[in-house]
Amino acid sequence: MAQFVDRRLNPRDKSLGNRQRFLRRTRVEVRRAVDKAVAERTIADASKGGAVSIPTDGIGEPQFHLSNESGEREYVRPGNKEFVAGDRIEKPKGGGAGGSGREGSESGSDQDPFSFALTEAEFLDILFEDLELPDLVKASLKDVSAKEFRRAGYTNDGATPNLAVLRTMRVSMGRRFALRRPTKADVERLEAELAGLEGRAVREPADEVRIGELSRDIALLKRRQRAVPFIDPIDVRYNRFTPTNVPRSKAVMFCLMDVSASMGEREKDLAKRFFILLHLFLKRKYERVDIVFIRHSHEAAEVDEQEFFYGLDSGGTVVSSALKAMIAAREARYPAADWNIYCAQASDGDNSGGDSRDCVALLAEAILPQTQYYAHIEIAAEGAINSDDSRHTDLWRAYAGLKEGASNFAMARVATRADIYPVFRQLFARQARHGGAP
Amino acid sequence: MTATTLTAGASTAGDGFLFEGAEWDFEMVRRVYAAIETIARDDLGLDVYPNQIEIISAEQMLDAYSSVGMPLMYAHWSYGKRFVRDEALYRKGYQALAYEIVINSNPCISYCMEENTMAMQAVVIAHAAFGHNHFFKNNYLFQQWTDASGILDYLDFAKRYIASCEELHGHEAVESTLDAAHALMGQGVFRYPRAAKLKFAEYERRRRERVERETRDYRDLWRTVPGAAPAPTGDLDEQDARERKLRLRLPEENLLYFLEKNSPTLRDWQRELLRIVRNLAQYFYPQRQTKLMNEGCATFVHYTIVNRLYDKGLISEGALLEILHGHANVLTQFDFDDKRYGGINPYALGFAMMQDIQRICVAPNDEDREWFPEIAGREDWRAVLRDVWANYRDESFVRQFLSPNLIRKFRLFAVSNKASDSSVRIEAIHDAEGYRRVRSALADSYDVSANEPDIQVVDVDLLGERSLVLRHTLRNGVRLAEVDREATLRQICRLWGHAVRLEETPIKAC
């Protein structure tokens, strides 16, 4: 008779290791494909993972094959309709495969890109690989520390949820061995023998003696079992946790976005894409980073995520209002002594007359000295990205002066969807905090 | 235990059927298995390894696909590549999954998909657990070359060993060695059994005997006899080369074996990796030579068993029709000019040949008597088929048993194709003049070793630059494809550590 095994409940993802090896090997190509996917799809879609295609170059498994462009061969095909022996049939021209056209199915497919699907986690890992917030621990190492409970061996007393079952059973087993506690099997063996003897129709005198012995032994074993408990309170062990000081970096990211009337659909879309990317990045890489969303037209307001990305608002443009709102939030909740402060600003560069100077003053005096990193992206008009300096906006020119003095200030321009991800990488590339405008 | 007592005990199925409807449970599968086993053993006389039938999900089937169908396998990126590709194809609906996978092991493991209906499970059990299983256990190639009882343990060893190598030597080093070894998998099999290695004691005894004989027979006088052969002087280089070839047992067709034993650069763990890849290649080699027969045998077995189940009143007409529908789908043979044509379907031709042998045994006509005098009218087709399954491989099977009847039925024709010509020539069709030529050409196409490049190690320059000389012996002037040629040679270089030269020579007329 056969064995039937239900394997459906076995651990899943048996191929995970192979899959990771494959991704590691094709890392460069997959990165390129992911970059492309970000540019082409909406970010929300792209970040869910999905199909990517890579060229087959790096993943070939070479073997010796026989060429079908030389020599002669004979083969058999089914389904003859009208041929008779001796017929000659022209080979199809330019099929690439020099042999018979009917064998063409295999060739050619080598050139197709290799398509497969990435999971969301894989996708984001690749997307944000080598990116980080610069200088994350600088401020925090000084005085910010938090307590965290870490495992530290076992202890004899503790709370029930911390019971270390395996360790307890191990200790209990040792004690049972040492004290020679009879096992269940011992008792059962004697009981079985006893039952066998008692069940006999005719009993010899020797049997009676044996029955007496067995009953006595069983009683003795059982008493011993009761006397030596299976688990004694002295066996019980608990996991021990001890509080440890761990340096913890507290970080906050201020996202400042211009939503004034001068930002058209296109500009808003680009700005939002940038912030969605930033948001995904922070969530993926830094669990404990606070994010503060501030949007402004002629006045600024701190809003929640939903409002920030999907709210409708319009008006004039006063950029400094957003900077002031940011300073206010910082004073109230994120003292610079305890927090690493980051800021990302997106704007189309329009600003009401004279306000740009105020912005520069605010940045230079109040913000940059207290900030780890400040990134400004400007949504440029389409095609403007390569034009000369004279067409730069008011705000850009004002900010450009700042760049000289402050190493923690970076700025970049984006004009199309495809620019966003490269600019994002450039702004947050590991050890690239001096990265500025191209 | 007989099927009838089983049905009597079955409370769920009415009318004495083993099952009704599509749903299945383990109790039902057991019942059906017992009924199938009765027919397989008592009626067909099959001899099988103990069966282990495992129910798996679609995802696990994908896992099994990617690890060449084995239940456990060492880790390598190429299996990941296969997995992501199959997964993408499956999710998009381009590719359906197999109903089953069966492994040549003892006990014989068959994977059945949970999505199969009960009728399909019955077919799968008959097909895999009895058809393939019988073939694995009895065919001479499998007996000669594979160790069904040891394969799972060996894979377990391979998996652990390679994992430990990855830890010790790093992923990259292991990966590049395995890549190189995989490139030579096609040249990593022994095609002929080699002379058994002498036990050391035996070797020593023979050596001593030889020395004694030489001492006994030595006559110094013979040296002075005029006209005696002069002491071997000859070209020292030539002598050296001869000795070297003798010592390295050249020429050698198993490149992986040669590199494992003789490469000057490989480290011990790398040699072990080569040996693992080589052993797996050898394990799969019989399967590649018997695809047609193996599928033909399994399909014939399930077809016969399912019909017997129906005759005995154990399955309903609905179930039989469902099974025959699936059966017909698998057996479709498209014509060469059909868009869906993808070669000769081994299920279709294999099954047709098995049925044809049965027909020749039971109801032969004059043509059959002329072509197959040994089996025509022999009545006991079961014994004939069992003998066929045990003693042939695809190539010899077609050469021996493809009948004119089937050549006509499939309308087979032979085409010859010279690469230099602009046209191909029809050499033979399904007529009296053509049968033998078609049959022989088809048999040749199933000869695995004749359709792979014949590459052998012919010489090694051990004293000089240590270059390795490979020779590709051309058959019918067919050269190696440029694609991958250099890449594969580079992989050999990596294993050999020094220059590798590949020469192509036409086959010598004997």
Image (cartoon, rainbow, N blue to C red):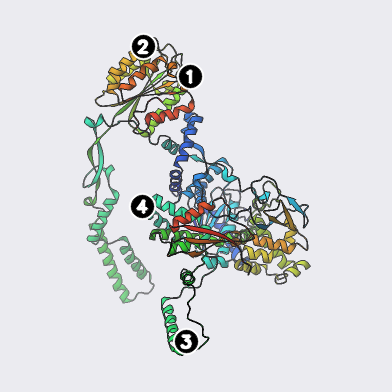
> Can residue A119 be seen from the camera position used here?
no
Between discs 2 and 1, the one toward the N terminus: 2
Depth check, front residue: A264 or A328: A264
Q: Relative to A436, is B425 on the left or the right?
A: right
The Cα atoms of the two marked residues, 2 and 1, are separated by 21 Å
Q: Quickly name the residue at label 3.
A: B223
Helix, strand or loop for disc 2: helix
Q: Residue furthest front?
A: B226
Q: Nearer the viewer, mark 2 or mark 4?
A: 2
Q: Quickly name the residue at label 1.
A: A381
Q: Chain of mark 3?
A: B
- Circles 2 and 1 on the same subunit: yes
The Cα atoms of the two marked residues, 2 and 4, are separated by 61 Å
Q: Chain of mark 2?
A: A
Q: Chain of mark 4?
A: B
Residue at point 29%, 61% (across, down): A183
Helix, strand or loop for disc 1: loop
Q: Relative to B63, is A82 on the left or the right?
A: right
Measured as percent of width and height from the top left, residue B190 is found at 52, 65
Q: Are marks 1 and 3 in contact (CB under 8 Å)?
A: no
Helix, strand or loop for disc 3: helix
Q: Are marks 2 and 1 in contact (CB under 8 Å)?
A: no
Helix, strand or loop for disc 4: helix
Q: Nearer the viewer, mark 2 or mark 3?
A: 3
Mark drawn on residue A355 = 2
Q: Relative to B134, is B201 on the left or the right?
A: left
At label 2, the amino acid type is Asp
At label 3, the amino acid type is Arg
Q: Quickly name the residue at label 4.
A: B167
Which quarter shows the C terminus of chain A? top left
Measured as percent of width and height from the top left, residue B312 is found at 65, 60
At label 1, the amino acid type is Ala
